[in-house]
Image (spheres, helix red, strand yellow):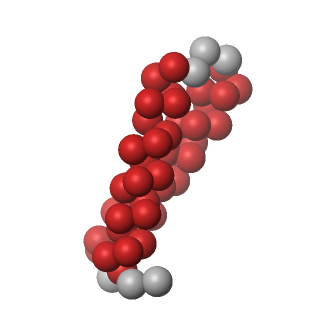
Amino acid sequence: MAESDRAKELALELDELKPLHRIATRPRVLSLIASEIRNIEKRSNDDKIHP
């Protein structure tokens, strides 16, 4: 997968997860979604630093 495709996929994943995080009410679900958002943001930032 090309770097730009990977960046687009990560952005799309974040676009889907953030609204889910806003509507989630269960603590475990909130924690899981928040953790995945952090992981994706970290991967996205790492890709920018180390293409």
Toward the viewer: 9 or 48?
9
The vertical placement of 13 against 33, above or below, is: below
Q: Is residue 50 at least partly visible in the picture? A: no
| Residue located 66% across and 20% down the image | 27
Asked whether the viewer can see residue 37, the reply is yes
Q: Nearer the viewer, residue 17 or 41?
A: 17
Q: Position of residue 36 (x, y in %)?
A: 56, 46
2 left or right of 35?
Answer: left
Seen in the image, is 8 located left or right of residue 38?
A: left
Looking at the image, is 44 positioned above or below residue 35?
below
Can you tell which quarter of the image residue 25 is in? top right
Dividing the picture into quarters, in which one does residue 2 lie?
bottom left
> Is residue 13 depicted above or below 49 in this figure?
above
For the residue pair 16 and 31, the one nearer the viewer reads as 16
Residue at image x 58%, y 37%? 33
Q: Name the residue located 37 percent from the left edge and 55 percent from the top edge.
A: 11
Q: Position of residue 3 (x, y in %)?
A: 36, 80
Please identify the residue farthest to the right as the structure is shown.
28
- The answer to which of 36 and 6 lies nearer the viewer is 6
- Which residue reaches farthest top? 25
Identify the residue at image location x=42%, y=47%. Answer: 14
Number of numbered labels in the structure image: 0
Give x and y (percent) for residue 49: 29, 74
Q: Quadrant of the C terminus?
A: bottom left
